[in-house]
């Protein structure tokens, strides 16, 4: 019988990395397209009240936010410590809510305008007077779908 010997060790070929930059750019492009940036800068501070029965909103694209709370530390020197109403990126009064609701409705499709929801993000320590005033103005603007933002607390 003949014994066959190998004539040398074969080396494993090197892995080609020429397509690696293409893959990295595709992943980067995917995350750039699928990530959304924050729409508004918060000018008020708030700690949401606690709740045990919480539901998530279905379509967040149909939700417009009204923030109510104490101005941030940078704004307190100018505006004081009284609770303020933030609509989009500025402080407003309750009289400006009608224009805010009309502008938010105009941004939606005809079919989605009836489903528009206003979400109140109010500080837990805010007096109900300012919240009641906001609700009255929302009624005048015919924005009757209202939700309150809260943080979920587990109860046993």
Image (tube, rainbow, N blue to C red):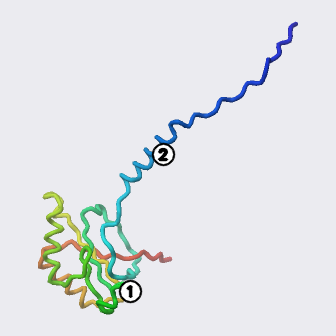
Residue that sits furthest to the top in the current view: 1
* Residues packed near mark 2 inside 10 Å, few (<14), some (14 to 19) or many (20 plus): few
Q: How crowded is mark 1: few (under 14 residues within 10 Å), some or many (20 or more)?
A: few
Q: Is residue 92 left or right of residue 47?
A: left
Counting residues from the N terminus, which is met first, the one under dot 1 or under dot 2?
A: 2
Number of numbered discs: 2
Q: In which quarter of the image is residue 108?
A: bottom left
Seen from this angle, which residue lies furthest right?
1
Asked whether, in this view, residue 11 is left or right of residue 28, the answer is: right
20, 92: nearer the viewer = 20
Judge from the rendering whether residue 124 lies leftward or rightward of residue 131; answer left or right: right
How far across and down, in percent of the image, does residue 139 sit? Answer: 14, 78
Residue pictured at 30% horizontal, 76% vertical: 148
Residue at x-position 33% and y-position 86%: 75
The disc label shown at residue 139, or none: none
As helix, strand or loop, the secondary structure at mark 1 comes to helix
According to the picture, the residue beneath numbered tag 1 turns out to be 73
The quadrant of the picture occupied by the N terminus is top right
In the displayed structure, 21 sits above or below 124; it is: above
Image position, residue 125 (x, y; %)? 36, 89
Snapshot quadrant of residue 130: bottom left
Q: Residue at x 29, y 82 (%)?
A: 68
104 and 16: which is toward the camera: 16
Q: Percent from the top left, x then y, of residue 153? A: 45, 77
Residue 24, numbered label: 2
Q: Position of residue 123 (x, y in %)?
A: 35, 84
Residue drawn at point x = 34 percent, y = 89 percent? 76
**SS at badge 2:** helix
Q: Distance between the residues labelled 1 and 2?
A: 41 Å
User: Are circles 1 and 2 on residues that touch, CB within 8 Å?
Assistant: no
């Amino acid at each position: 019988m003949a014994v066959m010997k190998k004539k040398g060790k074969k080396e494993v070929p090197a892995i080609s990395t020429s397509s690696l930059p293409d893959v990295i750019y595709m992943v980067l492009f995917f995350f750039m397209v699928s990530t959304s940036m924050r729409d508004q800068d918060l000018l008020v501070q708030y700690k949401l009240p606690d709740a045990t029965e919480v539901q998530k909103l279905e379509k967040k694209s149909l939700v417009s936010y009204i923030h109510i709370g104490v101005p941030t530390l940078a704004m307190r020197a100018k505006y004081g410590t009284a609770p303020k109403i933030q609509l989009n990126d500025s402080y407003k009064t309750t009289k400006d809510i009608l224009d805010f609701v009309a502008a938010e409705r105009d941004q939606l499709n005809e079919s989605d305008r009836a489903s528009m929801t206003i979400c109140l993000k109010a500080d837990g320590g805010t007096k109900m007077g300012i919240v009641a005033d906001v609700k009255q103005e929302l009624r005048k603007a015919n924005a009757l779908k209202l939700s309150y933002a809260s943080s979920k607390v587990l109860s046993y």
